[in-house]
Amino acid sequence: MQNFCICIPTYQRDDSLILLLKQLMEQSLLPDCIVIIDGVPNADNTSTVLDNLKNVNLRIPITQIYLPSNHANLPYQRFLGYKFAHQKNYELILFIDDDISLLQKDSIFSVMKPLLDNPQIFGVSTNISFEVSKKQPKNVSSFIIEKLGSSKKYIPGDITPSGNRIPIYCSNYEYEDVSYLSGGVMGYRMKYLQLENFSQDLFALYERKLGKGEDTILSLRVRGKIPFKILCSNKYFFHPDNNPHAYPTEAFRRGYSIAYSRRMINDNYRGINKVRIIDKLELYKSYLGTNIINFFDFLFSLNSKKFSYFWGYATGSLRGIFQKPTTKNLAPHINWWKDAEEALKNMIIIK
């Protein structure tokens, strides 16, 4: 059996974190180590988090690590988890968001099975059951997507240069091939996960609270010739919608962040290789189509929040066209690699 660790970035979700840990202890496949990376180590609930972690009853001895992050920043917190796993020579790493619930006793085994069975698989993810379903576009929106969208050129499980994820159509297969990973559950084979796969520009984007889709960006920088695998069924993992969010939820900021993050996805569409002109054109066409959709969405409803979202997305689109999101532009005062080394010095072995 290959040794692996579970990395849980957390952000002001004490109750859901403890629930997740208790559910992990009931799994048929247990990790060798669990590392919790706290995005707000200076908050008032830090001692509560530590106390609760110490009180979680482990079915068998598992190393638990508490790692206070020096940035409240999801992609950076995942990078700290990677750095820890790399130092300890773990073969596999599974990232789980702290607000994910495990619905079955074999949830972890089910998502990790492709990595355990096939040494050539780079990474895995899963479909997740959400508390609130996303609405499908209708009428004018459908027409605009048909005319300006590029998704019809891509196969299920693919991703477009503008960041649109093409949904998979699961048939009788338990797993399907995908060219990207997304969601709150992602597993990687450590030998394929390298320092160059992590982006300081992405850290800076999230530091300024402008980030969305960091999970996809990481997988784009990792992917190779062999596709990732996704667990088709959504009966294993659940995501509630009532927990604190680490990303902007106010309408203007959310629209702005989504649009500007699309530029980041576009810049990383070909991984660490240079993006092509045709990829840029697809991003600009997507910006145009989405702004038209958002405008009509507001016009037909005259809702102030929808106007704020439209205006935010439009403003973020303009910035995405004219300014590349880089650490130099967004957070030039931060030395991410040095900060990571300092953070690792502060880890606490709980058990």
Image (cartoon, rainbow, N blue to C red):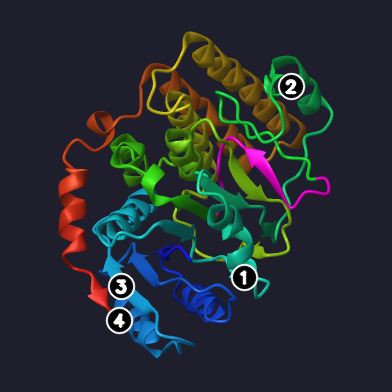
Q: Which residue is mark 4?
A: 350
**Residue extent of the magenta highlight:** 171-184
Q: Residues within 10 Å of mark 3 (few under 14, many from 20)?
A: many
Q: Residue at x 23, y 69 (%)?
A: 347
Give the structural element (helix, strand or loop) at label 3. Answer: strand
Q: Amino acid at mark 1?
A: Leu
Q: Which residue is mark 1?
A: 102
Q: Residues within 10 Å of mark 1 (few under 14, many from 20)?
A: many
Q: Amino acid at mark 3?
A: Tyr
Mark 2 or mark 4: name the one nearer the start of the chain: 2
Residue 277 percent coordinates (x, y): 48, 9
Q: Quadrant of residue 199?
A: top left
Q: CA distance from mark 4 to mark 1?
A: 23 Å
Q: Is residue 149 above or below residue 1?
A: above
Q: Are marks 3 and 1 in contact (CB under 8 Å)?
A: no
Q: Is residue 158 above or below residue 107?
A: above
Q: Quadrant of residue 344?
A: bottom left
Q: Which residue is mark 2?
A: 152
Residue 99 percent coordinates (x, y): 53, 66
Q: CA distance from mark 2 to mark 4?
A: 50 Å
Mark 2 or mark 1: name the one nearer the start of the chain: 1
Mark 2 or mark 3: name the one nearer the start of the chain: 3
Q: Residues within 10 Å of mark 4 (few under 14, many from 20)?
A: some
Q: Quadrant of residue 62?
A: bottom left
**Mark carried by residue 283:** none
Q: CA distance from mark 4 to mark 3?
A: 7 Å
Mark 4 or mark 1: name the one nearer the start of the chain: 1
